[in-house]
Amino acid sequence: EAQVTQNPRYLITVTGKKLTVTCSQNMNHEYMSWYRQDPGLGLRQIYYSMNVEVTDKGDVPEGYKVSRKEKRNFPLILESPSPNQTSLYFCASSVFRGPWSEQYFGPGTRLTVT
Amino acid sequence: AQTVTQSQPEMSVQEAETVTLSCTYDTSESDYYLFWYKQPPSRQMILVIRQEAYKQQNATENRFSVNFQKAAKSFSLKISDSQLGDAAMYFCAYRSAEGGSEKLVFGKGTKLTVNP
């Protein structure tokens, strides 16, 4: 089954404790990205990757890091989480530059930073 | 930068009735794609319908259809014969067709309630 998986689905942590949210897709997609969703703000892109070892900032990259060492994986790293990073996070993937490319979203990760 | 505006934070509709969700966007580009995503309580993002800007014909997917007005930069979603399962957050999104960008720019969402 074609899918994007994220782990963990729920995470409660404390300020300053490094964490990683994993994202994996099994569709051989070149493009992967991370979004955060906040009430009243919709979804905003954090980082994206057009292929292995190619990453770039989205609209709200502060406080986040990413890496793309393998095509299927695109982890989101919060090295020193703060309460304002409490949010719902989505990973998405798609065929890059396809005119009919559709972004497939993961199930979301609910992060709470206290 | 492109922006997407959904002016209705919440809407409600009676089961079996028709409801229209509004979306406007701002862009200087001529070629782009527009989408409506549904987010039920499960939080999964589900693509409902898409529209290519170069196509004049409005997209339709079963009970879902759009009214795309390119000159007015308007992209509304009509849900016909509303069902209880249509209750969800709906997000309008824009994607450029220029420069190979895959980034989706989302509106703030409209929460749809379906009353039995």
Image (tube, coloured by chain):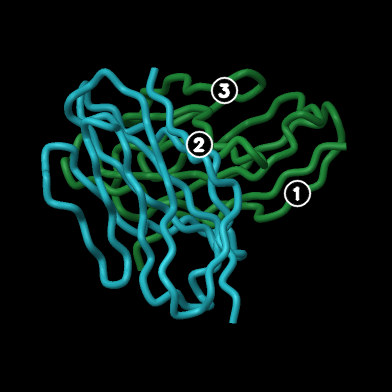
Front tag of 1 and 3: 3
User: Which residue position holds label 1?
Assistant: A11
Answer yes or no: do the residues labelled 3 and 2 have beta carbons within 8 Å?
A: no
How far from the left and from the top, in percent, is residue B66? Answer: 28, 54
- Dot 2 falls on which chain? A
Residue in view at x 53 percent, y 75 percent = B14
- B71 and B65: which is toward the camera: B71
Q: Give the SS element for disc 1.
A: strand
User: Which residue position holds label 2?
Assistant: A34
Front tag of 3 and 2: 3
Image quadrant where one finds the C terminus of chain B: bottom right
* Chain that appears green: A
Q: Give the SS element for disc 3.
A: loop
Within the image, what quadrant is residue A33 found in? top left
Amino acid type at mark 1: Leu
Image mark for residue B95:
none
Amino acid type at mark 3: Val
Disc 1 residue crowd, few under 14, some 14–19, many 20+, Cα 10 Å: some
User: Which residue position holds label 3?
Assistant: A60
Q: Is residue A27 left or right of residue A40?
A: left
Q: Give the SS element for disc 2.
A: strand
* Chain that appears cyan: B
